[in-house]
Structure formats: structure tokens, C-alpha cells
Image (spheres, rainbow, N blue to C red):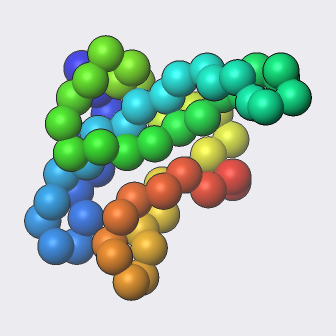
Amino acid sequence: MAFSYQNAKGVTYYLHGKKVTLKNGRMQQIYFFARDVRAEALDAVPAGYTVVETKRTGMPVLKKA
């Protein structure tokens, strides 16, 4: 079951993560929220992170704790 977050506007977002290759060839893990559940969905917030909501758009983002 994917981790879900409902913002103040009542919209539900699901947490996803995947590894991407940067231009310098280094691999990096990224996290993002989407309105639908995709193959990269995560079951929980990664250790050391918390979910916060942006003031302007209400979009959830991960912030290091």
C-alpha cells in the first residue's frame, strides 16, 4: 500500500521514489509525490525525512528531519 498524504485542500498525494542518473554519471535517489499510484510507489516515508506542505500550492514535499 502506497504512502498517502492529504493536503489542506483535501487532495490526496502518493509518495514515489526512483534512482536517476545525473549528467556526471552519479546515481541519486529522488522522491516525489503524485496524485496517482505508480510502479515506483513507496510504502513509508524514508528514514530521516518528514512530510511538509508548501504554503503557495499545498503540494507535499519531503524535508530532512
Is residue 2 placed above or below 53 in the rendered structure?
Answer: above
Provide residue 18's location: percent of width, then percent of height: 53, 23
Is residue 45 placed above or below 20 in the rendered structure?
Answer: below
In this view, the residue farthest toward the left is 10
Q: Quadrant of the N terminus?
A: top left
**Of residues 20 and 51, the one drawn nearer to the viewer in this rendering:** 20
Task: Count the labels in the image.
Answer: 0
Q: Quadrant of the C terminus?
A: bottom right
Is residue 20 placed above or below 51 in the rendered structure?
Answer: above
* Residue 24 left/right relative to 34: right
Provide residue 43's location: percent of width, then percent of height: 37, 23
Name the residue rendered at 53%, 38% in the picture: 31
* Residue 38 left/right relative to 52: left
In this view, the residue farthest toward the bottom is 56
Name the residue rendered at 18%, 36% in the picture: 36
Is residue 53 placed above or below 40 in the rendered structure?
Answer: below
Q: Quadrant of residue 28?
A: top right
In this view, the residue farthest toward the front is 23
* Residue 59 left/right relative to 6: right
Residue 37 in view of the camera: yes
Name the residue rendered at 61%, 21% in the picture: 19
Provide residue 32's location: percent of width, then percent of height: 46, 42
In this view, the residue farthest toward the top is 39
Residue 43 in view of the camera: no
